[in-house]
């Protein structure tokens, strides 16, 4: 081997490879709750407050419309609105509470959050 070939071999061996980044590297990752997580952290019912507004669509939740309550924070939404939301996100659209952690929160923490809300609600089990 001549000197030029030897230098080329060393250069190849000593040059670190450029890592290949997947084309999807910068795309957002969708994190959605499981149906079990949605069921355990929410309830279907009707808000007692006739002026309750779904913050997703900004419309009043009427008495005959199905609504979903997030148990931890007691925020109400149209069932159709929040179900679409949960296909893309695990957080309450109002307070950003992660519904996956509802079973982990202590009972005293959950009670203090509920007491801080002034509205009363009725929930159908």
Image (cartoon, grey):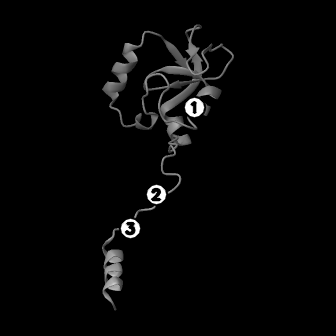
Q: Is residue 57 above or below residue 23?
A: above
Residue 18, image x, y percentages? 40, 63
Judged from the image, the secondary structure of the residue bearing numbered disc 3 is loop
Q: Which residue is mark 2?
A: 21
Which residue is at 45% across, 61% downward?
20
C-alpha span from label 1 to label 3:
42 Å
Q: Earlier in the sequence, mark 2 or mark 1?
A: 2
Q: Quadrant of the C terminus?
A: top right
Q: Which residue is mark 1?
A: 85
Is mark 2 in CB contact (under 8 Å) with mark 3?
no
In this orientation, does residue 102 appear? yes
Q: Which residue is mark 3?
A: 17
C-alpha span from label 2 to label 1:
30 Å
Total numbered circles:
3
Residue 67, image x, y percentages? 61, 22
**Horizontal side, residue 99 vs residue 80: left or right:** left
Q: Quadrant of the N terminus?
A: bottom left
Q: Nearer the viewer, mark 2 or mark 1?
A: 2
Residue 90, image x, y percentages? 49, 36
């Amino acid at each position: 081997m001549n000197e030029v070939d030897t230098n080329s071999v060393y250069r190849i061996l000593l040059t670190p490879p450029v890592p290949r980044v997947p084309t999807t590297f910068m795309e957002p990752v969708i994190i959605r709750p499981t149906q079990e997580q949605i069921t355990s952290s929410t309830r279907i019912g009707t808000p007692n407050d006739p002026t309750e507004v779904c913050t997703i669509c900004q419309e009043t939740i009427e008495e005959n419309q199905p609504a979903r309550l997030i148990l931890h924070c007691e925020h109400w939404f149209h069932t159709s609105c929040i179900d679409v939301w949960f296909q893309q996100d695990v957080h309450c659209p109002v307070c950003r509470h992660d519904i996956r952690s509802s079973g982990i929160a202590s009972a005293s923490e959950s009670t203090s959050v509920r007491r801080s809300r002034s509205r009363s609600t009725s929930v159908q089990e």
